Image: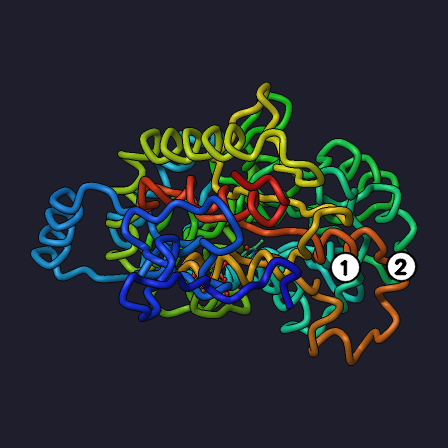
Amino acid sequence: MLTTQVPAPMASAKDGSLVPHPCASNKGKRIRAACDLAINGAAPAFSETVHVGRPNIGDRRAFLERVDTMFDRRWLTNNGPLVQELEAKLASYLGVRHVVAMCNGTIALEIAIRALGMKGEVIVPSYTFIATAQALQWQEITPVFADIDPVTHNLDPAAVERMITPRTTGIIGVHLWGRAAPVDELAEIARRRNLSLMFDSAHAFGASYRGRLVGAFGRAEVFSFHATKFFNSFEGGAITTNEDDLARDMRYMRNFGFEDYDRAVHPGTNGKMPEICAAMGLTNLETLDAVVEANRSNYVAYAEALEGIDNLHLLPYDPRESSNFQYVVVEVGDSFPATRDQIVAALHAEGILARKYFWPGCHNMKPFRDLYPHAGLLLPSTQTVSERVIVLPTGTALPPEAIGVITSVFRVLGKHEG
Ligand code: T4K
């Protein structure tokens, strides 16, 4: 229960009947005090839910024109011209030799993992979207969870080193929240211990590490272009690599192992991106800068409005690096007057579907908890961070008044009323 929870106050009208307190109205709702909160009985700020993953949608006319050409050609999938155009444009944008487009980020992870010959045990963070770990488990490779740096939320290289065993074959770094993992440190460990290194870059399209765009680090990187990502192709993803042989094998693998019409030369699956997804990707690529600018300006507005609230920490973006500003991540300190879950409940009551990504950590979810019931003992920062984080909505579809409402909820729950 919220400590601030009070029933919506009622006032007496002159005729003696009870009328709602003015702050129970949601017309241009301002949240100044506990009684204004929907969780305390006031009307919610939004009747239509405000989501974290609202898709950014580029120029519809440009998209529909591409779809028209696709229908005219009657070429809907199987490495069509739109997929090839998207791959070429992405390779040039990211500065990498090969982009292999895929049907989604999870299959792309599975294919990259297999193409790199990972087996036995592979070290990953537990503090990530579960797809990173599932892509290993799905091919009977054991994900071994290493702890994160509590400041950056990315893998802690010292923890990675501690988890290496004779069965370890690889490391998957995740550029969490679009902030680059410690690429150089992980590359040094991989080189010294003879391990394959790849990155789950699902969050990091357009983000840089030491001035170079993410996409050409490790032996391969994997992007997600899911609808909820700041750059989306409905569903989709891609593997990027500078290694020619690897790219060739991954192309076989995404197409059942076929080299030509008749001969399969490699184990394979179906990881192909359809043309309609490439049409969406190409269209959204044209408005990428505007989306980043919308995200950046939302982020700055959050930062300004949350400034001065004690025990609340907005994860910063490094101003020296390129960022997509896709994730607005707030950490709730232990001394904040409300718990993380109480804040999330208060936001949900207002119609704001803030998320607790990536609580409770992969190691605490059934597929992995059953395997390693005590993994949490080695993951103290993962445990702490996953209990503190709230991810807030952003993107081009964010209603203009949302940031004011959301930050007022934090202010009121943080006892900065009035
Ligand atoms: N690695 C990492 C580090 C990842 O974060 C992900 C995906 C992957 C790998 C795997 O890539 P993919 O195979 O997905 O390409 C969402 C996304 O579904 C998932 O793609 C993403 N990460 C993850 C961080 O977020 P959920 O379980 O939160 O999805 P869901 O359905 O709750 O959607 C989030 C919010 O977005 C909801 O409030 C509804 C809203 N939404 C969603 C869709 C699809 C919309 O408003 N419109 C929409 O079209 O996982």
Q: Earlier in the sequence, mark 1 or mark 2?
A: 1
Indicate whether 371 appears above or below 184: below
Furthest residue in direction front, as rendered: 15
The answer to whether marks 1 and 2 mark residues whose Cβ atoms lie closer than 8 Å is no
- Identify the residue position indicated by label 1 in the image: 122
In the image, taking residue 381 as reference, residue 131 lies left or right, namely: left
Residue at 81% x, 43% y is 156
Instruction: Measure the C-alpha gap from mark 1 to mark 2.
Output: 16 Å
Q: Nearer the viewer, residue 96 or 417?
A: 417
Type of amino acid at the residue the image marks with label 2: Leu
Please name the residue shown 48% across and 28% down the image.
300
Number of labels in the image equals: 2
Residue drawn at 79 percent across, 48 percent down: 195
Residue 12, image x and y in percent?
Answer: 37, 63
In the rendering, which numbered label is found on residue 378? 2
Q: Quadrant of the N terminus?
A: bottom right
Q: Is residue 13 above or below residue 173?
A: below
Q: Mark 1 vs mark 2: give the one in front.
A: 2
Which amino acid is tagged 1?
Answer: Val
Circle 2 packing at 10 Å, graded few (<14), some (14-19), many (20+), is some
- Where residue 178 appears, as percent x and y from the top left, is 56, 40
Whether residue 216 is visible here, answered yes or no, is: yes
Q: Position of residue 373 (x, y in %)?
A: 84, 75
Q: Which mark is residue 106?
A: none
Residue 129 horizontal/vertical position (percent)? 60, 59
Q: Is residue 85 left or right of residue 102?
A: left
Q: Which of 244/183 is in front?
A: 183
